[in-house]
Image: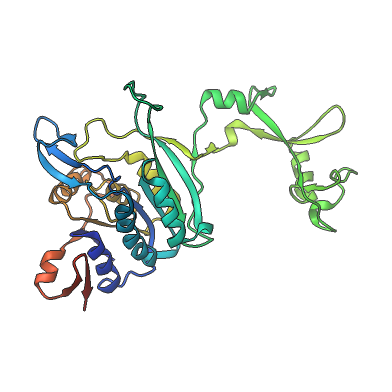
Amino acid sequence: MRNLLIKGDNLAGLRYLLDRKNLKGQIDLIYIDPPFATGGSFTITAGRAATISNSKNGAIAYSDKLVGKEYVEFLRARMVLLRELLSEKGSIYVHVDCRIGHYVKVMMDEVFGMENFRNDIARIKCNPKNFDRVGYGNIKDLILFYTKAADPIWNEPREKYTEKDIEKLFPKIDKQGRRYTTVPIHAPGETENGRSNQPFKGMLPPRGRHWRTDVETLEQWDREGLIQWSSTGNPRKIIYADEREGKRVQDVWEYKDPQYPIYPTEKNAEMLDLIIRTSSNPGSIVLDCFCGSGTTLKSAHLNHRKWIGIDQSEHAIRATIVKWASIEGDLSTGAPEYEFIDLEKVFADGKCSRTAETSSHCQ
């Protein structure tokens, strides 16, 4: 499949992908950053650098006029089609905020199933503000993470330990100066006559527990000096800090957005890299049907994924195309090749016919 950049209403664009491109069940990852139901319009003002505001000055990049129930139903119509496009190993991340996010979650529980809800990720978006208001300062938004089914693509994300992490998590130091900690070699739960319930050094695991691995592995660890015995004869596994890849990524992320974006509400590229590397594989198709300036598409390309972007804003399409110029010199990827589709021209050519104001049917 070729990369696709589609200009037009995204409901029509999603139907186009299903009917014309036959992509049902083919997309491994969807990330969307839809309007947040603010009731305003976001503009681009010409200057030394693009200035973003929701004022009345400048060219309107996009309007965010839908609120309340109307907004949730606007998203629901798209979620139904997005679920059809997702592969059985697919995931969807929906970036919203605290004003509308809880209503969106209830709707997504209905579309994707409560059992497929994975995380409500708090994303720290900015530095603390000191505006006078009744209420606490707002420095976060949220990302709702769902999967299509029970066994999604999942490449365990890790982040490096800080020096404080290492001091806290690996408080012991051996004779060679290596930092380490120890963990129990048994875990809760009994097994009957299993390999993890046999005697090790003449002892059985405590009542109600079992060895974390088979006795042969425990014997090997002991020979390699990776079992530490307490003064009371309690064995624990040695874990060295320098052998760990890092700590698991948790559900609070600090990825602040660009200070001088080229497009309204442009998101942090490192955050998109994390999502793409975690929930897709090289060669996977990544879809963003509110693609804005193309940050998701750029991250997908640099991480060797295929991509599809949809936006109806002329400013968004132009900003996305400009963004490709920033990676033309990247020797590992180069600028992407893609097919550009203008849905208005597709309709005019008779390849598709409108069946409703915001949907289409393609022959």
Using the image, determine if residue 270 lies above or below residue 312: above
Using the image, determine if residue 126 lies above or below residue 189: above
Where residue 104 sits in the image (x, y, percent)?
39, 51
Seen as rendered, the residue at the extreme right is 202
What colour scheme governs how the chains and residues are painted in the rendered image of this protein? rainbow
Q: Is residue 332 visible?
A: no
Where residue 150 sits in the image (x, y, percent)?
54, 61
Residue 224 horizontal side relative to residue 77, left or right? right
Q: Identify the image quadrant of the C terminus.
A: bottom left
Q: Identify the image quadrant of the N terminus.
A: bottom left
Q: Nearer the viewer, residue 302 or 52?
A: 52
Identity of the residue drawn at 83% across and 34% down? 234
Residue 346 horizontal side relative to residue 19, left or right? left
Quadrant position of residue 81: bottom left
Where residue 251 sits in the image (x, y, percent)?
49, 40
Quadrant position of residue 345: bottom left
Identity of the residue drawn at 40% across and 28% down? 135
Quadrant position of residue 74: bottom left
Q: Nearer the viewer, residue 65 or 53?
A: 65
Seen as rendered, the residue at the extreme bottom is 363
Where residue 292 sits in the image (x, y, percent)?
23, 48
Q: Nearer the viewer, residue 246 or 148?
A: 148
Q: Is residue 212 visible?
A: yes
Identity of the residue drawn at 84% across and 45% down? 205
Using the image, determine if residue 348 lies above or below residue 49: below
Residue 203 horizontal side relative to residue 240, left or right? right
